[in-house]
Amino acid sequence: MGNIFVRTGTAIIEIDRIVKAMKNKRFMSDYFSADEIRFLVSHDLSPALIAENYCVKIALAKAIGTGMRMIHARDITVLRDRLGAPFIIPEGNAKLLEQREGFVFNVSVAHCKDYATASVVINK
């Protein structure tokens, strides 16, 4: 039997909101893991890339069905493979859910001039 679709989540944000949030010194450390921050710094702290990663965190929380009540944004690391495709590394409660429920997280991101978006599909 193949993968079974479980849930999906999506999020969209204005990139300008991320630009404003980046002025808060705690924004990056509150929402992004150390590995993720290193990745984002290596991409010159691109607001569009940061907005995509932020959306992945919200979309995953929606797909899990708990919102940010059970998981913390830093528990969801979003990186890119060598071809630029995003992937999720769950930690903490997100990892516990992944392991306990047998979840497989699939993610897609996009951005244009003004908006960034992400969709997460969970399979088992």
Image: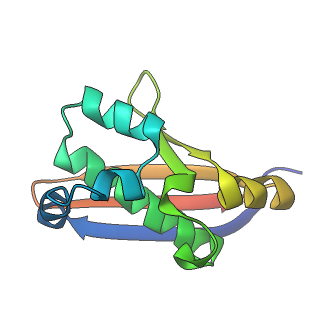
Identify whether 92 is placed above or below 68: above
- State the residue in front, 121 or 80: 80
Q: Is residue 124 visible?
A: no
Q: In which quarter of the image is residue 49?
A: top left
- State the residue in front, 98 or 111: 98
Which residue ends up furthest to the top in the rendered image? 82
Q: Is residue 16 left or right of residue 111?
A: left
Q: Position of residue 47 (x, y in %)?
A: 18, 49
Q: Is residue 116 visible?
A: yes
Q: Quadrant of residue 98?
A: bottom right
| Residue at (40% x, 57% y) in the render | 31
| Residue at (22% x, 55% y) in the render | 25
What count of labels does the image hold? Answer: 0
Q: In this view, does 27 lie to the left or right of 120?
A: left
Work out which quarter of the rendered image holds the C terminus and state it. Answer: bottom right
Q: In this view, does 52 lie to the left or right of 105?
A: left
Q: Where is residue 96 in the image (x, y as percent from the top left)?
A: 77, 57
| Residue at (42% x, 39% y) in the render | 36
- State the residue in front, 103 or 92: 92
Picture colour scheme: rainbow
Q: In this view, does 76 lie to the left or right of 2?
A: left
Which residue ends up furthest to the right in the rendered image? 1
| Residue at (58% x, 78% y) in the render | 69
Identify whether 68 is placed above or below 80: below
Q: Position of residue 26 (x, y in %)?
A: 29, 57
Q: Where is residue 103 in the image (x, y as percent from the top left)?
A: 75, 56
